[in-house]
Image (cartoon, helix red, strand yellow):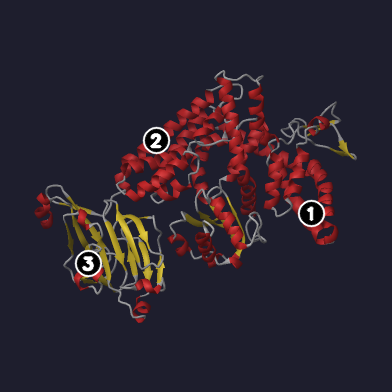
Amino acid sequence: MAKYSDLVSFIVENVGGKDNILSVSHCMTRLRFHLKDYSLINEANIASNSKIATAQKAGGEYQVVVGTMVGEIHAELSSFLGLKSDDSQTAEKSDSLLNRIIQIITKSITPVLGVLMASGLIQGMLALLVACGVLKTTDGAYIILNVMGNALFNFFPIFLGYTAAKAFKMDGFVGMAIGACLVFPTILANLTSGDPLFTLFAGTIFSTPVYKTFFGIPVIFPATGYTSTVVPIIISMYFTSKFEKFLKNHIPDIVAFTIVPFLTIAVCVPLTILAVGPIANFLSLLITAVITYLNNLSPVITSIVVGIVYQPLVILGLHWPLITIGITNMGAVGSDYIIPMIFTASFTQTAVVLAVYCKTRDKKIKNICVPAMISGCFCIIEPAIYGITLPVKKRFAFSIAGATVGAVIISLFGAKMYAVSVGVLGTVAFINPNGDMGGFYIAIIATLISMVVSFLLTFFTFNEQNPGAISASGGDGTANLLIHSPLKGKTVKLENVQDASFSKGVLGKGIAISPSEGKLVAPCDGIVSNLFSTGHALGITSDDGCEILIHVGIDTVRLNGKYFTIRTKQGNRVKKGDLLVEFDIDAITKEGYSLITPVLVTNSDDYFDIVETTSESVDYLEQLIRVLPNKKENAGKLAEA
């Protein structure tokens, strides 16, 4: 049995079934669905699954965040759908042009991102070894390590030729062949040697000398070639995919196996070198020039904008174009200042999580914090975002604030990255290949300062974000906790509930309510620590550590979720009064079930006493239970408070 088979079948069922899925891809932590009908998504069910961090529609697709095991889940999902891992059906054409561009960039970059970062790390470590005097540039070890670090960058269009071809649903090996033509070892020297015939666009950023012609057509080949470029091969694959599709529709299958790739390469390689490549290269130069101009005009404003928008873009899965610009800069001039501006973001998320870990008393939250901090150190920040910071928006804002401070520091001191690498090991990418360590030290200082900012903001405001169940104080200052009514209706003493587990206090002390309205709200501030997929029962751990169980009806688990609509998700932070579950009172009653709802403090043994309201009826958020701290000497005073 496959490792994630239950999760895969659950996701497919709740996005509308197999027939509703047009295509599915993935990035570092999320599955990305293109669906025929987005109204068929059962968002409540998806939100209730503890194995799913979050889900949302963004960028013209439905994104399901499942964490760093996404690759395995995607492979099983593709098998379940009867697709190859890189196959898909016809994508939705109603998406905007911007959405389609973002999707193509994401599908082209993310498959190779791991190897890209590994190569960048090797380059950074090599620069560190040279700076420390361990290696010389003439050493055999340096030569081999240099090849290891630069091979991917030198032949990047070949890798992107494959991934972009797959993104456009064409033959990936044809894409590789076209990419290989762009970076063929002798093409640059042969097409840019000798005296130029003439120069196009002289005096502009697009100035290009022409040395050769192709049957009379000028060959506009960039002086640095297409090594490390991104945009040209992706645009080339767009036109190539159209031509390949045309050929497949008009060439008999008996000869298509050879003739289609032959004609595709024969036509599209010259087209790419003569037209698509130069235009795409000019576009890349224009983008680089605009960003350089803005950065030169005001590095502070540029870094502030990048620092503020990056993490929200991560939530939407729209951050890849920003990274692509950085890669383009690196290919054009050998260094980049955009990726450095977002470098500290993963560390500020980690700092916020560390502050929460230090302050919280909730063991479940602590358990979320530990893996989130570990993954954050390697620039996988979705667990921190969805598990800890985003549910309390101030925390997310504090992470942005710290990251923006870091971006400004890096920008002001002119630190650049010379390879694509992130996380704790990514600092070595700030070392100049000539051995200059200045950027490395700036990156370390900026990272530490940004982490301190985010940590302190979170640490010293934690009580404001974490008020817990509303508390009252006795005259001696000892607090007792108030649990408010999650329902409107008549109160029922627990001993009168027709279920021994509740009436005998086996599950804890408390009170029951016979609801008059079909809405269940949060009785306090806290975390949804347990949520049954059927919606009939849930647990909340208040910020003061009080564990509350709410069980809607007796034996209603047998309804298997029928007549219940979940409005929250396990692990969510909720505030008093937030809607948790809706249920159909009339329908459940007609099925023959009692709707008497016990509200229990399951860890009541941790407290001196549990005092229930004496009112015969309660409205939403009226005082229902008072929890007395386990201090006998103060019990009398508290009971009178």
For residue 582, side relative to residue 198 (left or right): left
What secondary structure is marked by label 1?
A: helix
Using the numbered discs, state the Cα–Cα distance from disc 3 to disc 1 in whole angstroms: 71 Å
Question: Which tag, 2 or 1, sits closer to the chain's start?
Answer: 1
Please name the residue shown 46% across and 30% down the image.
446
200 vs 525, nearest the viewer: 525
Q: Where is residue 349 in the image (x, y as percent from the top left)?
A: 44, 41
Please name the residue shown 65% across and 32% down the image.
148
**Three-letter amino acid code of the residue under disc 1:** Phe
Judging by the rendered image, the residue that carries numbered circle 2 is 453
Task: Reply above or below: 570 against 586.
Answer: above
272 vs 90, nearest the viewer: 90
Please name the residue shown 67% across and 47% down the image.
163
How busy is the neighbourhood of tag 1: few (under 14 within 10 Å), some, or many (20 plus)? some
Q: Are marks 3 and 1 in contact (CB under 8 Å)?
A: no
Please name the residue shown 39% across and 35% down the image.
453
Q: Position of residue 338 (x, y in %)?
A: 57, 36
Judging by the rendered image, the residue that carries numbered circle 1 is 243
- Which label lies toward us, 3 or 2? 3
Q: Position of residue 228 (x, y in %)?
A: 68, 36
Q: Residue 396 carries which label?
A: none
Judging by the rendered image, the residue that carries numbered circle 3 is 511
Please indicate, yes or no, whether residue 349 appears anywhere in the rendered image: no
